[in-house]
Amino acid sequence: EELVNEVRAYSHRDKEAEDFLNHYGKHGDEPLRHIRIVATMNLADVRNLFMVGEALTRRFTVIEVPCPKGDEDLDKLLGDGLGELGKALPGLKDRLKSLVSCARGKVKDKDKGLCIPPSAVKAALKLLSKDYSVNPGRVSLDSVLKDFADYLQLSMGLVMGEERKNTLRNTVNECLGQSGQQR
């Protein structure tokens, strides 16, 4: 009401002010009751949430989206992200799926808060595809897997401390070794 009274008191009202008063006269504040704000944040942002202020944060509902377990999301990611490289190396999709699934399982056991999210897998696939579209000559399954493992670690490295980077690197290398033995 205060805002409406203030706008009404203006000696000169532009079109926006007139539209606001007309709309408010017809509908009142009912439309405002249907406004929802949706925001997302990653784990790095959550640590800084206190900076937003308690008065604001208590007005939000937090819905946590858990990290995928195993390979439940990988068929879609790998199917969309491999492109020509997947055609050139027929067993690549299964090997990548095995590698990510293994790394997710082992990382979860070693560090409860560490997650290999779909966004990291997607970023690694994007880097891999660009790398091999520029350098198609060195296409062996083992070199592609190794490069993917490196890109996966790079895609996650910005939000992790040194200890977690080491955990991830050791886990991915361990799974990479297992993936090579399963051929």
Image: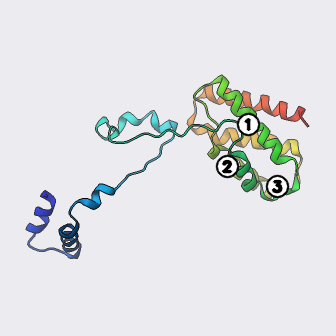
Relative to the observer, which residue lies in front, 100 or 129?
A: 100
Local secondary structure at mark 2: helix
Residue at 58 percent across and 39 percent down: it is 158
Q: How is the image coloured?
A: rainbow
Question: Would residue 12 be found to the left or right of residue 16 on screen?
Answer: left
Residue at 68 percent across and 38 percent down: it is 153
Residue at 65 percent across and 28 percent down: it is 108
In primary-sequence order, the first of circles 3 and 2 is 3
Q: Residues within 10 Å of mark 2 (few under 14, many from 20)?
A: some
Question: Would residue 29 be found to the left or right of residue 6 on screen?
Answer: right
Furthest-right residue in this view: 183
**Residue under label 2:** 122
Could you tell me if the residues under marks 3 and 2 are in contact, i.e. CB atoms within 8 Å?
no
Q: Report, in whole angstroms, how far the alpha carbon at label 3 lies from the one at label 2.
A: 15 Å
In primary-sequence order, the first of circles 1 and 3 is 3
Q: Residues within 10 Å of mark 1 (few under 14, many from 20)?
A: many
**Residue under label 3:** 85
Local secondary structure at mark 1: helix
In primary-sequence order, the first of circles 1 and 2 is 1
Q: Amino acid at mark 3?
A: Leu
Residue at 75 percent across and 54 percent down: it is 79
Q: Is residue 166 visible?
A: no
Q: Report, in whole angstroms, how far the alpha carbon at label 1 lies from the one at label 2.
A: 14 Å
Q: Amino acid at mark 1?
A: Ser
Q: Amino acid at mark 2?
A: Lys
Relative to the observer, which residue lies in front, 179 or 76?
A: 76
Q: Where residue 77 sits in the image (x, y, percent)?
A: 70, 50
Disc ID at residue 101: 1
